[in-house]
Image: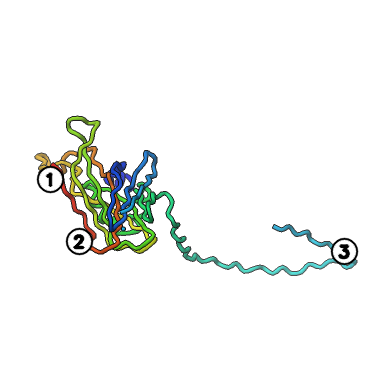
Amino acid sequence: MEQRVKKYLLIAAITSSSLLFPSAYAATPTSKASPSAKATPTVSKSAEATPAVSSTTKKPTKKPVKKKKKVKKTATPIPSPSPEWPPSGFTANKGIYAKIPTSKELLGLISAKAGLAEIVKKCESNACGAVIVAADYRCEWWEIKSTVYGVDPNDASKKVTLGKLRTLYGPLSAKTYANIILVSDEPLYGPSFLDPNSGQTVAGPARNGISVGGISAICHKSGTDEKFPANIYTPIR
């Protein structure tokens, strides 16, 4: 599973600048070359005992030793510790926090929530990203903006923009974490074709170098008519 996620859930370094919204707060996650990525948000609304020894003329008698009954220990559930607050490893800006999860963190949250595992299946064929968000206060809804990049066909050392992605997430209480998967419609493989030898339809060649970056997480403090959760992808051709 970990290899699968590493292969398909592509989380790139963040390059976009902070966004400013009058009725919301925005967090722009940034990642380093190290395994753990950081995010950068911006605003938008013994004591010892000495045994005593005594002597006596009487011959000491041995007292019967009572065998202690072994009490079988039963496993008791250990409550999860309270979430650390403010969260460490996150980038903070005026009460909001954002972080791009490592592959290990991502596997943990996916195994904890079946719904996320279903979403990740889509990332076997489409370019995806991920971000963890939280805030000091309640957010009525979250808007995550990101960009899908590809390799420049004229220069392999450069990237070109393939499309823009808006991911919408519902209300989130104060000091609560949300793990958001960003799913685009940008395919990771070329068009499928019919294998003349087997007669079966097979996936096209892999489109290497596709990544999701430029992530901005925005906490909106007022409602919206938009439907969520949602992923709205706009390809650029």
Judging by the rendered image, the residue that carries numbered circle 1 is 201
Query: Which of the 4 quarters of the picture holds residue 153?
Result: top left
Q: Quadrant of the C terminus?
A: top left
Mark 3 lies on a secondary structure that is: loop
Judging by the rendered image, the residue that carries numbered circle 3 is 55
Count how many numbered circles sit on residues in the image. Answer: 3
- Give coordinates of residue 87: x percent, y percent: 42, 54
Of 159 and 123, nearer the camera is 159
Point out the tag, 2 or 3, that comes first from the N-terminus: 3
Furthest residue in direction right, as rendered:
57
- Give coordinates of residue 160: x percent, y percent: 20, 37
Q: Is residue 121 above or below residue 188?
A: below
The three-letter amino acid code for the residue at tag 1 is: Thr
Taking the spot 20% from the left edge, 40% from the top edge, the residue there is 161
Mark 1 lies on a secondary structure that is: strand
Query: Which of the 4 quarters of the picture holds residue 157?
Result: top left
> For the residues marked 1 and 3, what is the alpha-carbon distance in whole angstroms?
95 Å
Query: Which of the 4 quarters of the picture holds residue 134?
Result: bottom left
> For the residues marked 2 and 1, what is the alpha-carbon distance in whole angstroms?
38 Å
The three-letter amino acid code for the residue at tag 2 is: Glu
Do labels 2 and 3 touch, CB within 8 Å?
no
Judging by the rendered image, the residue that carries numbered circle 2 is 226
Furthest residue in direction front, as rendered:
22
Of 47 and 92, nearer the camera is 92
Asked whether residue 57 appears in the rendered view, the answer is yes
> For the residues marked 2 and 3, what is the alpha-carbon distance in whole angstroms?
89 Å
